[in-house]
Amino acid sequence: MSKQQLPNAAILREWLEAHGGVFHPSVEFRNDPLTGLSPFASTELPSGETLVSCPFELAVTPEESTRAICDICGLDDSELQGWNERMRICGYLGLHLTRAASGVDLPSSLRHLPYINALPPCSELLTPLFYSPAELELLAGTNLYGAVHDREQELRAEYEQVQSKLRGDAPSWDQYLSCATYISSRAFPSKLLRIPDSGSVETRAVDTSEEEESHPVLLPGVDLFNHARGQPITWLSSPMNISNKQVKTISLVSCTIVKAGQQVFNNYGPKSNEELLLAYGFILDPNPDDTVILRLGTNGLPEGIVEKLKAKQLDATKRFALGADGLVPNELLQVMRVMLGGADEEVEIDEEDEHALHAQEQKETELELDVLGQLGAMLEDKLQRLKSHKGDSQVDGVREHVRKMCVVYREGERAPEFGA
Protein backbone atom coordinates (compact mmCIF):
# COMPACT_ATOMS: atom_id res chain seq x y z
CA MET A 1 0.00 0.00 0.00
CA SER A 2 1.34 3.46 -0.89
CA LYS A 3 2.21 5.80 1.97
CA GLN A 4 -0.44 8.27 0.83
CA GLN A 5 -3.40 5.91 1.01
CA LEU A 6 -3.99 6.16 4.77
CA PRO A 7 -3.95 9.99 4.83
CA ASN A 8 -6.01 10.01 1.62
CA ALA A 9 -8.55 7.71 3.28
CA ALA A 10 -8.84 10.22 6.12
CA ILE A 11 -9.44 13.00 3.58
CA LEU A 12 -12.08 10.86 1.85
CA ARG A 13 -13.80 10.29 5.18
CA GLU A 14 -13.92 14.03 5.89
CA TRP A 15 -15.18 14.74 2.36
CA LEU A 16 -17.89 12.07 2.57
CA GLU A 17 -19.13 13.26 5.96
CA ALA A 18 -19.06 16.90 4.82
CA HIS A 19 -21.43 15.94 1.99
CA GLY A 20 -23.95 14.01 4.08
CA GLY A 21 -22.24 10.63 4.21
CA VAL A 22 -21.59 8.64 7.36
CA PHE A 23 -18.79 6.41 8.63
CA HIS A 24 -19.40 4.57 11.88
CA PRO A 25 -17.14 6.17 14.53
CA SER A 26 -15.73 2.74 15.40
CA VAL A 27 -14.70 2.01 11.81
CA GLU A 28 -11.09 3.00 11.21
CA PHE A 29 -8.73 2.39 8.31
CA ARG A 30 -5.51 0.45 8.62
CA ASN A 31 -2.92 -1.08 6.35
CA ASP A 32 -3.47 -4.84 6.19
CA PRO A 33 -0.56 -6.86 4.74
CA LEU A 34 -2.95 -8.99 2.66
CA THR A 35 -5.79 -6.63 1.73
CA GLY A 36 -4.07 -3.22 1.80
CA LEU A 37 -6.17 -0.25 2.90
CA SER A 38 -8.98 -1.86 4.90
CA PRO A 39 -11.63 -0.92 7.51
CA PHE A 40 -11.29 -2.35 11.02
CA ALA A 41 -13.44 -2.15 14.14
CA SER A 42 -11.75 -0.07 16.84
CA THR A 43 -14.42 -1.22 19.31
CA GLU A 44 -16.96 -4.03 19.13
CA LEU A 45 -19.65 -3.39 16.53
CA PRO A 46 -23.08 -4.87 17.37
CA SER A 47 -25.31 -6.39 14.73
CA GLY A 48 -27.57 -3.89 12.99
CA GLU A 49 -25.03 -1.05 12.96
CA THR A 50 -24.73 1.24 9.94
CA LEU A 51 -21.09 0.92 8.91
CA VAL A 52 -21.06 3.49 6.12
CA SER A 53 -23.62 5.53 4.19
CA CYS A 54 -23.18 7.29 0.86
CA PRO A 55 -25.79 9.78 -0.40
CA PHE A 56 -27.15 8.94 -3.83
CA GLU A 57 -25.97 12.33 -5.07
CA LEU A 58 -22.33 11.35 -4.45
CA ALA A 59 -22.56 8.20 -6.57
CA VAL A 60 -20.46 8.16 -9.73
CA THR A 61 -22.99 7.34 -12.43
CA PRO A 62 -22.86 7.24 -16.23
CA GLU A 63 -25.38 10.09 -16.32
CA GLU A 64 -23.32 12.42 -14.14
CA SER A 65 -20.16 11.40 -15.98
CA THR A 66 -21.74 12.30 -19.31
CA ARG A 67 -22.81 15.74 -18.09
CA ALA A 68 -19.35 16.52 -16.71
CA ILE A 69 -17.53 15.35 -19.85
CA CYS A 70 -19.77 17.41 -22.11
CA ASP A 71 -19.48 20.47 -19.86
CA ILE A 72 -15.69 20.39 -19.60
CA CYS A 73 -14.85 19.32 -23.15
CA GLY A 74 -17.55 21.33 -24.91
CA LEU A 75 -19.23 18.28 -26.36
CA ASP A 76 -22.86 17.51 -27.07
CA ASP A 77 -24.13 14.32 -25.47
CA SER A 78 -25.00 13.02 -28.94
CA GLU A 79 -21.25 12.88 -29.64
CA LEU A 80 -20.94 10.22 -26.93
CA GLN A 81 -23.73 8.09 -28.36
CA GLY A 82 -21.40 5.15 -29.02
CA TRP A 83 -19.94 5.18 -25.52
CA ASN A 84 -20.98 2.50 -23.05
CA GLU A 85 -21.37 3.13 -19.30
CA ARG A 86 -17.79 2.08 -18.54
CA MET A 87 -16.34 4.51 -21.08
CA ARG A 88 -18.34 7.38 -19.62
CA ILE A 89 -17.27 6.69 -16.04
CA CYS A 90 -13.65 6.06 -17.08
CA GLY A 91 -13.64 9.32 -19.02
CA TYR A 92 -15.02 11.17 -16.02
CA LEU A 93 -12.51 9.68 -13.59
CA GLY A 94 -9.73 10.27 -16.10
CA LEU A 95 -10.56 13.97 -16.36
CA HIS A 96 -9.89 14.28 -12.63
CA LEU A 97 -6.46 12.71 -13.07
CA THR A 98 -5.36 14.76 -16.07
CA ARG A 99 -6.66 18.07 -14.71
CA ALA A 100 -5.19 17.45 -11.25
CA ALA A 101 -1.81 16.55 -12.78
CA SER A 102 -1.76 19.85 -14.67
CA GLY A 103 -2.01 21.75 -11.39
CA VAL A 104 -5.14 23.72 -12.27
CA ASP A 105 -8.17 24.03 -10.01
CA LEU A 106 -10.81 21.47 -10.88
CA PRO A 107 -14.19 22.73 -12.07
CA SER A 108 -17.20 22.07 -9.84
CA SER A 109 -18.36 19.27 -12.14
CA LEU A 110 -15.24 17.28 -11.19
CA ARG A 111 -16.01 16.68 -7.53
CA HIS A 112 -14.69 13.20 -6.82
CA LEU A 113 -10.94 13.82 -6.49
CA PRO A 114 -10.87 12.97 -2.74
CA TYR A 115 -12.47 9.64 -3.61
CA ILE A 116 -10.14 8.89 -6.53
CA ASN A 117 -7.04 9.74 -4.49
CA ALA A 118 -8.03 7.12 -1.90
CA LEU A 119 -8.10 4.34 -4.51
CA PRO A 120 -5.03 2.12 -5.01
CA PRO A 121 -2.55 3.37 -7.63
CA CYS A 122 -1.89 1.51 -10.86
CA SER A 123 1.22 -0.13 -9.39
CA GLU A 124 -0.88 -1.92 -6.75
CA LEU A 125 -3.65 -3.28 -8.99
CA LEU A 126 -3.41 -7.06 -9.31
CA THR A 127 -5.81 -8.10 -12.05
CA PRO A 128 -4.07 -9.99 -14.90
CA LEU A 129 -4.33 -6.86 -17.06
CA PHE A 130 -1.44 -5.53 -14.96
CA TYR A 131 0.70 -8.69 -15.10
CA SER A 132 4.14 -8.77 -16.66
CA PRO A 133 4.53 -11.05 -19.71
CA ALA A 134 6.17 -13.67 -17.49
CA GLU A 135 3.31 -13.48 -14.99
CA LEU A 136 0.70 -13.76 -17.72
CA GLU A 137 2.35 -16.97 -18.93
CA LEU A 138 1.44 -18.53 -15.58
CA LEU A 139 -2.14 -18.54 -16.88
CA ALA A 140 -1.31 -20.31 -20.15
CA GLY A 141 -3.75 -23.10 -20.91
CA THR A 142 -6.52 -21.59 -18.76
CA ASN A 143 -9.67 -19.73 -19.74
CA LEU A 144 -8.23 -16.57 -18.24
CA TYR A 145 -5.29 -16.54 -20.63
CA GLY A 146 -7.52 -15.79 -23.59
CA ALA A 147 -10.01 -13.76 -21.54
CA VAL A 148 -7.28 -11.31 -20.50
CA HIS A 149 -6.33 -10.77 -24.14
CA ASP A 150 -9.97 -10.27 -25.12
CA ARG A 151 -10.54 -7.81 -22.26
CA GLU A 152 -7.44 -5.80 -23.16
CA GLN A 153 -8.47 -5.58 -26.82
CA GLU A 154 -11.94 -4.46 -25.77
CA LEU A 155 -10.55 -1.77 -23.46
CA ARG A 156 -8.05 -0.54 -26.07
CA ALA A 157 -10.87 -0.08 -28.57
CA GLU A 158 -12.79 1.91 -25.96
CA TYR A 159 -9.74 3.96 -25.07
CA GLU A 160 -9.18 5.01 -28.68
CA GLN A 161 -12.72 6.38 -28.82
CA VAL A 162 -12.33 8.21 -25.51
CA GLN A 163 -8.97 9.61 -26.56
CA SER A 164 -10.36 10.92 -29.85
CA LYS A 165 -13.04 12.94 -28.04
CA LEU A 166 -11.18 14.14 -24.95
CA ARG A 167 -7.93 14.85 -26.84
CA GLY A 168 -5.59 16.76 -24.52
CA ASP A 169 -7.75 15.94 -21.52
CA ALA A 170 -7.71 12.21 -22.22
CA PRO A 171 -6.15 9.99 -19.55
CA SER A 172 -3.14 7.85 -20.41
CA TRP A 173 -3.66 4.21 -21.31
CA ASP A 174 -2.49 3.10 -17.86
CA GLN A 175 -4.90 5.56 -16.24
CA TYR A 176 -7.79 4.33 -18.38
CA LEU A 177 -6.92 0.74 -17.51
CA SER A 178 -6.85 1.66 -13.81
CA CYS A 179 -10.24 3.38 -14.04
CA ALA A 180 -11.74 0.37 -15.81
CA THR A 181 -10.36 -1.84 -13.03
CA TYR A 182 -11.88 0.41 -10.37
CA ILE A 183 -15.22 -0.20 -12.06
CA SER A 184 -14.83 -3.98 -12.41
CA SER A 185 -13.67 -4.37 -8.81
CA ARG A 186 -15.76 -1.75 -7.01
CA ALA A 187 -18.97 -1.01 -8.90
CA PHE A 188 -22.40 -1.72 -7.44
CA PRO A 189 -25.57 -2.29 -9.51
CA SER A 190 -27.53 0.88 -10.21
CA LYS A 191 -30.70 -0.86 -8.98
CA LEU A 192 -29.52 0.10 -5.48
CA LEU A 193 -30.24 3.73 -6.36
CA ARG A 194 -33.92 2.96 -6.90
CA ILE A 195 -36.14 3.18 -3.83
CA PRO A 196 -39.84 3.98 -3.43
CA ASP A 197 -40.89 7.51 -2.49
CA SER A 198 -41.36 6.29 1.06
CA GLY A 199 -39.71 3.39 2.83
CA SER A 200 -36.48 1.56 2.10
CA VAL A 201 -35.10 -1.44 0.22
CA GLU A 202 -32.82 -4.09 1.70
CA THR A 203 -30.58 -6.04 -0.67
CA ARG A 204 -27.88 -8.66 -0.34
CA ALA A 205 -25.31 -9.47 -2.98
CA VAL A 206 -26.76 -12.96 -3.37
CA ASP A 207 -30.12 -11.38 -4.22
CA THR A 208 -28.84 -9.36 -7.19
CA SER A 209 -29.44 -10.69 -10.67
CA GLU A 210 -27.22 -10.05 -13.68
CA GLU A 211 -30.31 -10.28 -15.86
CA GLU A 212 -32.03 -7.36 -14.13
CA GLU A 213 -31.67 -4.09 -16.02
CA SER A 214 -28.85 -2.26 -14.29
CA HIS A 215 -25.48 -0.64 -14.91
CA PRO A 216 -22.37 -0.04 -12.81
CA VAL A 217 -22.14 2.85 -10.35
CA LEU A 218 -19.38 3.72 -7.89
CA LEU A 219 -20.28 4.49 -4.28
CA PRO A 220 -17.50 6.41 -2.49
CA GLY A 221 -16.71 4.98 0.92
CA VAL A 222 -19.02 2.00 0.52
CA ASP A 223 -16.56 0.33 -1.85
CA LEU A 224 -13.67 0.40 0.63
CA PHE A 225 -14.97 -2.74 2.38
CA ASN A 226 -13.34 -5.96 1.21
CA HIS A 227 -15.07 -9.22 0.28
CA ALA A 228 -15.60 -12.13 2.65
CA ARG A 229 -17.52 -15.12 1.35
CA GLY A 230 -20.69 -15.79 3.33
CA GLN A 231 -20.37 -12.60 5.37
CA PRO A 232 -23.89 -11.54 6.46
CA ILE A 233 -24.33 -7.93 5.36
CA THR A 234 -27.24 -5.81 4.16
CA TRP A 235 -27.11 -3.18 1.43
CA LEU A 236 -29.76 -0.73 2.59
CA SER A 237 -31.19 1.90 0.24
CA SER A 238 -33.15 4.35 2.36
CA PRO A 239 -33.76 8.02 3.16
CA MET A 240 -31.80 9.37 6.14
CA ASN A 241 -32.45 12.49 8.16
CA ILE A 242 -29.28 14.56 7.69
CA SER A 243 -29.22 18.19 8.86
CA ASN A 244 -33.04 18.17 9.05
CA LYS A 245 -33.29 17.03 5.44
CA GLN A 246 -34.32 13.66 4.00
CA VAL A 247 -31.38 12.38 1.96
CA LYS A 248 -31.51 9.17 -0.07
CA THR A 249 -28.53 6.99 0.82
CA ILE A 250 -27.04 3.55 0.28
CA SER A 251 -25.62 1.98 3.44
CA LEU A 252 -23.83 -1.15 4.57
CA VAL A 253 -25.49 -2.56 7.69
CA SER A 254 -23.84 -5.26 9.80
CA CYS A 255 -25.78 -8.47 10.43
CA THR A 256 -23.34 -9.96 12.93
CA ILE A 257 -21.13 -8.77 15.77
CA VAL A 258 -17.68 -7.57 14.68
CA LYS A 259 -15.18 -7.79 17.51
CA ALA A 260 -12.69 -5.03 18.25
CA GLY A 261 -9.60 -5.35 16.08
CA GLN A 262 -11.31 -7.41 13.37
CA GLN A 263 -11.57 -6.30 9.77
CA VAL A 264 -15.08 -5.24 8.73
CA PHE A 265 -16.15 -6.98 5.54
CA ASN A 266 -18.71 -6.66 2.78
CA ASN A 267 -19.98 -9.62 0.75
CA TYR A 268 -19.94 -9.36 -3.05
CA GLY A 269 -21.92 -12.56 -3.50
CA PRO A 270 -20.79 -15.96 -4.85
CA LYS A 271 -17.80 -15.51 -7.17
CA SER A 272 -15.54 -18.05 -8.83
CA ASN A 273 -11.79 -17.55 -8.60
CA GLU A 274 -11.74 -16.84 -12.33
CA GLU A 275 -14.13 -13.92 -11.86
CA LEU A 276 -12.37 -12.72 -8.71
CA LEU A 277 -8.95 -12.73 -10.36
CA LEU A 278 -10.01 -11.11 -13.64
CA ALA A 279 -12.24 -8.41 -12.17
CA TYR A 280 -10.90 -7.88 -8.64
CA GLY A 281 -7.30 -9.09 -8.55
CA PHE A 282 -7.53 -11.65 -5.74
CA ILE A 283 -8.61 -15.24 -5.16
CA LEU A 284 -10.07 -17.28 -2.32
CA ASP A 285 -8.36 -20.44 -1.13
CA PRO A 286 -10.37 -22.57 -0.80
CA ASN A 287 -13.34 -21.26 -2.78
CA PRO A 288 -16.51 -23.40 -2.63
CA ASP A 289 -18.04 -21.17 -5.32
CA ASP A 290 -15.32 -21.98 -7.83
CA THR A 291 -16.37 -23.10 -11.29
CA VAL A 292 -14.91 -24.45 -14.50
CA ILE A 293 -15.81 -22.35 -17.53
CA LEU A 294 -16.52 -23.98 -20.88
CA ARG A 295 -16.84 -22.20 -24.20
CA LEU A 296 -18.07 -23.94 -27.31
CA GLY A 297 -16.38 -23.59 -30.68
CA THR A 298 -18.94 -21.87 -32.89
CA ASN A 299 -16.85 -20.90 -35.93
CA GLY A 300 -18.06 -22.54 -39.11
CA LEU A 301 -21.42 -23.66 -37.78
CA PRO A 302 -23.83 -24.51 -40.62
CA GLU A 303 -26.42 -21.83 -41.27
CA GLY A 304 -29.21 -24.25 -40.39
CA ILE A 305 -27.73 -24.82 -36.92
CA VAL A 306 -27.31 -21.08 -36.38
CA GLU A 307 -30.93 -20.45 -37.33
CA LYS A 308 -32.14 -23.27 -35.10
CA LEU A 309 -30.23 -21.83 -32.13
CA LYS A 310 -31.76 -18.41 -32.80
CA ALA A 311 -35.24 -19.90 -33.01
CA LYS A 312 -34.75 -21.51 -29.62
CA GLN A 313 -33.20 -18.29 -28.22
CA LEU A 314 -29.99 -20.09 -27.33
CA ASP A 315 -26.59 -18.36 -27.25
CA ALA A 316 -23.79 -20.75 -28.17
CA THR A 317 -21.09 -18.08 -27.69
CA LYS A 318 -21.64 -17.53 -23.97
CA ARG A 319 -19.41 -18.88 -21.22
CA PHE A 320 -20.96 -21.80 -19.33
CA ALA A 321 -20.02 -22.38 -15.69
CA LEU A 322 -19.78 -25.86 -14.21
CA GLY A 323 -19.77 -25.86 -10.42
CA ALA A 324 -18.12 -28.29 -8.03
CA ASP A 325 -21.50 -30.01 -7.58
CA GLY A 326 -21.01 -31.46 -11.06
CA LEU A 327 -24.33 -30.15 -12.37
CA VAL A 328 -24.20 -29.20 -16.04
CA PRO A 329 -26.11 -26.02 -16.95
CA ASN A 330 -29.31 -26.90 -18.78
CA GLU A 331 -28.68 -24.22 -21.41
CA LEU A 332 -25.32 -25.79 -22.25
CA LEU A 333 -27.01 -29.16 -22.78
CA GLN A 334 -29.69 -27.53 -24.95
CA VAL A 335 -27.08 -25.80 -27.11
CA MET A 336 -25.07 -28.98 -27.54
CA ARG A 337 -28.18 -30.96 -28.48
CA VAL A 338 -28.86 -28.51 -31.29
CA MET A 339 -25.24 -28.41 -32.45
CA LEU A 340 -24.87 -32.20 -32.46
CA GLY A 341 -28.42 -33.01 -33.52
CA GLY A 342 -28.28 -31.34 -36.90
CA ALA A 343 -30.44 -28.76 -38.59
CA ASP A 344 -33.33 -31.06 -39.52
CA GLU A 345 -36.72 -29.74 -38.55
CA GLU A 346 -38.40 -31.45 -35.64
CA VAL A 347 -41.44 -33.46 -36.66
CA GLU A 348 -44.40 -34.39 -34.54
CA ILE A 349 -44.75 -38.10 -33.83
CA ASP A 350 -48.11 -39.84 -33.81
CA GLU A 351 -48.44 -41.10 -30.24
CA GLU A 352 -50.16 -44.23 -31.55
CA ASP A 353 -47.28 -45.08 -33.90
CA GLU A 354 -45.18 -47.29 -31.62
CA HIS A 355 -42.50 -47.85 -34.26
CA ALA A 356 -42.03 -44.11 -34.78
CA LEU A 357 -42.03 -43.46 -31.05
CA HIS A 358 -39.38 -46.13 -30.50
CA ALA A 359 -37.23 -44.72 -33.30
CA GLN A 360 -37.57 -41.23 -31.85
CA GLU A 361 -36.66 -42.44 -28.37
CA GLN A 362 -33.61 -44.25 -29.72
CA LYS A 363 -32.53 -41.14 -31.62
CA GLU A 364 -32.86 -38.97 -28.50
CA THR A 365 -30.90 -41.49 -26.42
CA GLU A 366 -28.08 -41.55 -28.97
CA LEU A 367 -28.04 -37.75 -29.01
CA GLU A 368 -27.79 -37.60 -25.21
CA LEU A 369 -24.87 -40.03 -25.32
CA ASP A 370 -23.20 -37.90 -27.99
CA VAL A 371 -23.69 -34.77 -25.88
CA LEU A 372 -22.27 -36.38 -22.74
CA GLY A 373 -19.39 -37.87 -24.69
CA GLN A 374 -18.53 -34.52 -26.23
CA LEU A 375 -18.80 -32.81 -22.86
CA GLY A 376 -16.45 -35.35 -21.31
CA ALA A 377 -13.99 -34.86 -24.17
CA MET A 378 -14.06 -31.09 -23.66
CA LEU A 379 -13.29 -31.45 -19.95
CA GLU A 380 -10.51 -33.94 -20.66
CA ASP A 381 -9.01 -31.62 -23.27
CA LYS A 382 -9.15 -28.74 -20.83
CA LEU A 383 -7.41 -30.83 -18.16
CA GLN A 384 -4.66 -31.90 -20.55
CA ARG A 385 -4.01 -28.30 -21.61
CA LEU A 386 -3.65 -27.31 -17.96
CA LYS A 387 -1.25 -30.18 -17.31
CA SER A 388 0.86 -29.26 -20.34
CA HIS A 389 1.72 -25.85 -18.85
CA LYS A 390 3.74 -25.51 -15.67
CA GLY A 391 1.96 -22.68 -13.93
CA ASP A 392 4.11 -22.87 -10.79
CA SER A 393 7.50 -22.41 -12.43
CA GLN A 394 9.95 -20.18 -10.61
CA VAL A 395 10.93 -17.67 -13.29
CA ASP A 396 12.27 -14.15 -13.31
CA GLY A 397 9.83 -11.26 -13.53
CA VAL A 398 7.13 -12.92 -11.41
CA ARG A 399 5.95 -11.48 -8.11
CA GLU A 400 5.56 -14.15 -5.46
CA HIS A 401 1.98 -13.20 -4.50
CA VAL A 402 0.97 -13.26 -8.17
CA ARG A 403 2.55 -16.69 -8.61
CA LYS A 404 0.64 -18.02 -5.60
CA MET A 405 -2.68 -16.69 -6.90
CA CYS A 406 -2.09 -18.25 -10.31
CA VAL A 407 -1.18 -21.61 -8.78
CA VAL A 408 -4.37 -21.65 -6.68
CA TYR A 409 -6.46 -20.62 -9.69
CA ARG A 410 -4.96 -23.36 -11.88
CA GLU A 411 -5.54 -25.98 -9.19
CA GLY A 412 -9.17 -24.89 -9.02
CA GLU A 413 -9.43 -25.37 -12.78
CA ARG A 414 -8.06 -28.90 -12.47
CA ALA A 415 -9.92 -29.98 -9.36
CA PRO A 416 -13.51 -30.37 -10.61
CA GLU A 417 -13.10 -33.37 -12.90
CA PHE A 418 -16.80 -33.74 -12.21
CA GLY A 419 -17.16 -37.37 -13.08
CA ALA A 420 -18.68 -36.20 -16.36
Image (cartoon, grey):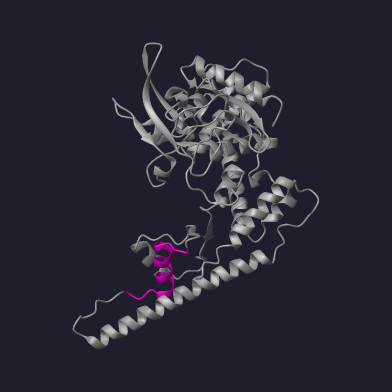
> Which residue is found at the position 63% from the left and 44% from the top?
127
- Closer to the camera in the image, 374 or 314: 374
Query: Image check: 116 left or right of 191?
Result: right
Whether residue 327 is situated above or below residue 4 in the rendered picture: below
- Closer to the camera in the image, 324 or 274: 324
> Which residue is found at the position 65% from the left and 21% from the top?
7
Whether residue 182 is situated above or below residue 127 in the rendered picture: above
Can see residue 240?
yes
Q: Which residues are magenta?
A: 326-345
> Which quarter of the figure is the N terminus placed in?
top right
> Which residue is found at the position 55% from the left and 39% from the top?
185
Query: Image check: 203 left or right of 163?
Result: left
Mainly helix, strand or loop, the magenta region? helix
Can see residue 75?
no
Residue 44 location, x and y as percent?
A: 52, 26
Whether residue 268 is situated above or below residue 59 in the rendered picture: below
Residue 390 location, x and y as percent?
A: 72, 61
- Closer to the camera in the image, 235 or 300: 235
Query: Image check: 110 left or right of 392?
Result: left
Residue 200 location, x and y as percent?
A: 33, 29
| Residue 95 within the magenta-colored segment of the rendering | no
> Which residue is found at the position 18% from the left and 84% from the top?
352
Farthest residue, direction bottom: 355
Residue 224 location, x and y as percent?
A: 56, 31
Q: Number of marks in the image? A: 0
Farthest residue, direction left: 352
Farthest residue, direction top: 244
| Residue 344 within the magenta-colored segment of the rendering | yes
Whether residue 346 is situated above or below residue 250 in the rendered picture: below
